[in-house]
Image: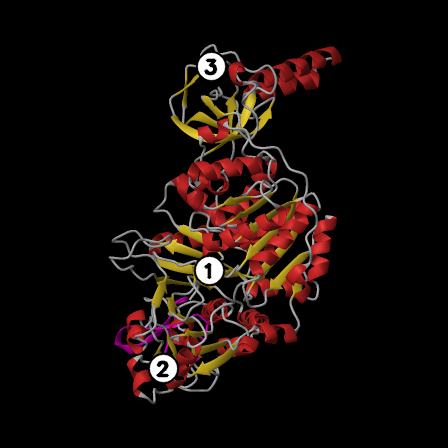
Amino acid sequence: MSRENGRSEVGVEASGTGEQLALIREAVREKKADRAKPRTWRGAELAAELPVARVLVDKGLVHLDRYFDYAVPAAMDAEAQPGVRVRVRFGAGEKGGRREGGKLVSGFIVERVAESEYRGVLAPLAQVLSPERVLSPELLGLCRAVADRYAGTLADVVQLAVPPRRARAEAKPSPPLLAPNAPPEVGSWARYGAGAGFLSALTRGDAPRAVWTALPGATWPQELARAAAAALAGGRGALVVVPDGRAAARVDEALGELIGEGRHVLLTADAGPEERYRRWLAVSRGSVRAVIGTRAAMFAPVADLGLVALWDDGDSSHSDPHAPQPHAREVLIQRSVNERAGFLLGGLSCTVEAAQLVETGWARPLTAEREQVRAAAPLVRTIGEGDEARDAAARAARLPSMAWQVVRDGLTRGPVLVQVPRRGYAPRLACERCRTPARCRACAGPLEAQEAGALACAWCGRGELDWHCAECGGARLRAQIVGARRTAEELGRAFPAVPVRTSGRDHVLTTVPGAPALVVSTPGAEPVAEGGGYAAALLLDGWALLGRPDLRAGEEALRRWLGAAALVRGQAAGGTVAVIAEPTLRPVQALVRWDPVGHAVRELAERAELGFPPVSRMASVAGRGEDVAELLRTAELPSGAEVLGPVPLPVPDAGRPRRPGDPPPGEEWERALVRVRPGQGAALAAALKAARAARLVKREGEAVRVRIDPPDLG
């Protein structure tokens, strides 16, 4: 209805008789209804009921983050149901009462409705790719929540959640759902004070939430499997997410032994696209109610979910590199809330985010008594980098004498693990006296050495003219150690009669025999030693981990040390771990005491004092300098938002593969950080998303990358 027609009709209605008014109202209603109905397109007959399909188009552009209406042809009426994949014409124009042109793009039907708010001619669905309803309302709601939290688009998240279609897999039926298994025995969960109660609550159908600090040893896969089996015994589903395929295979084997075959599936990339999609379909169709998998499995559509479990949430593998880069921990927390499922966040270490869940009361701690910890953990000895090699054999291996002695003694009883940090960490500055990282007095960001020896903050760019250490008052700085200096070849020369095995990069070992051998591994690639574990472990070059340009350097170093030390036999069996790092540092002391929770609690308190995540919420805005400045100027940021920077981003090495977030080749980018108070994270994400959408609509400048809660803060 035009404005003129609207005004004339209202005028008649105001002055006419009651019968005239009724006739006019009826005519207006019929005209509106006629415009709301999709008109036929090239004479095609449309569905008699609910002729409009709302489609999520596979276009991950932030300004197109909405649904688009299409007409449903009568021939597609039966198959065009909510959740199915379709092909549609996108970007079509209207000519002579017809909707023409546009490119064929994929999408999902999210809803069927009777009328459309669009007043033009609706283009019809071009094709129903499959009648399989892969995007359920529950999965759609989860994807929407994740997109909103990370300032992303729904289409991008759905692309992460729903695997690509494989027609042959869809053509095969899924097996019938098996009856629930019997409740599992408590087993090694009895070592944890509330372990038996947690399993019982899952079996009853309750939704307990726990942060679990696992005891050292190789029993954690069995304990995760028992938790999943308890949820299945209660008639509900279970989802377990682990960092890599090796861990998934261990949990898969343990769960298979508990509940038998046919009740769970393994979702990892190793299965191949078609087989993985076949297993995903079995979950989507309700044939299987238990899933073990890596990061992508966090979206697995498990029916009647009773437990979500995440192992080792500090591992970087849990953060998806694709937009909008969600973290598995946050996705599973959202699922636990949405689906009223139990929640289990476990690991040998403890992140500050896990500590915050306990501190806020959202989850309960699930830990063992100190006596149990001391009995299971190996003896940890510290060796400062100033310690010297006092004999020729130790000097040949470039090891302090104590470290060389630990290796030699361990080889008399079994294999010895040697953890070597990865190479290539960029240096940062620290106090020469106490080794405390040098940070900016304005925003607590890391200080970097600029040209001519000047200091500047890597976050806000502010120069530092008169730096003094906040811990000891020292004024001298040193560069942190970069990379690993000891190699498997050097150790082989020091112990010529002992076989040397390596694990890391493209060749990762799963297990090694229990016979004496040197096993040199990078962090996260340590194989399990048969026969009860390693006799000893040597953790080399602690400064290479502690000196990383990362807010999580201490937490990450402790996590990697604990992961290696947990593979060593307990003190009663003579297991010993030697770590080469400054003995007085907090992460080293936490390793000696085997107290990851205490370390995380202290880290959380310091971050609360400094306003660091996760106590605050933070966003990274990166792009060309003028584009970053313009986006921040136009964004309606929450009150009290603090903008740090922008500062130039380092240009990546020419020979290094590009990673998500790296500037395009030849471009100089800047990054600004936006920090807000707790409770303002949703408003921050919405403001940055709206500003990006407005820029795209107006075609102003180049694209700007936004990341919520970036894990790589320096």
The reply to whether callout 1 and callout 3 are in contact (CB within 8 Å) is no
The reply to whether callout 2 and callout 3 are in contact (CB within 8 Å) is no
Residue type of the residue flagged with mark 1: Pro
Q: Where is residue 22 in the image (x, y as percent from the top left)?
A: 71, 14
Residue type of the residue flagged with mark 2: Leu
Asked which quadrant contains residue 544, the reply is: bottom left
**Image position of 713 with respect to 544: above or below:** above
Q: Which of 476 and 286 is in front in this view?
A: 286
Residue type of the residue flagged with mark 3: Trp
Q: What residue would you read off at disc 3? A: 41
Instruction: State whether the magenta stretch is mostly helix, strand or loop.
Output: loop
Asked which quadrant contains residue 164, the reply is: top left
The residue located at (44%, 36%) in the rendering is 274
Q: What residue would you read off at disc 1? A: 711
- Under tag 2, what secondary structure? strand
- First in residue order: circle 1 vs circle 3: 3
Q: What residue would you read off at disc 2? A: 477
Q: Position of residue 313 (x, y in %)?
A: 53, 59
User: What's the magenta region?
Assistant: 436-465
**Image position of 388 with respect to 407: above or below:** below
- First in residue order: circle 1 vs circle 2: 2
On the rendered structure, is 489 left or right of 325? left
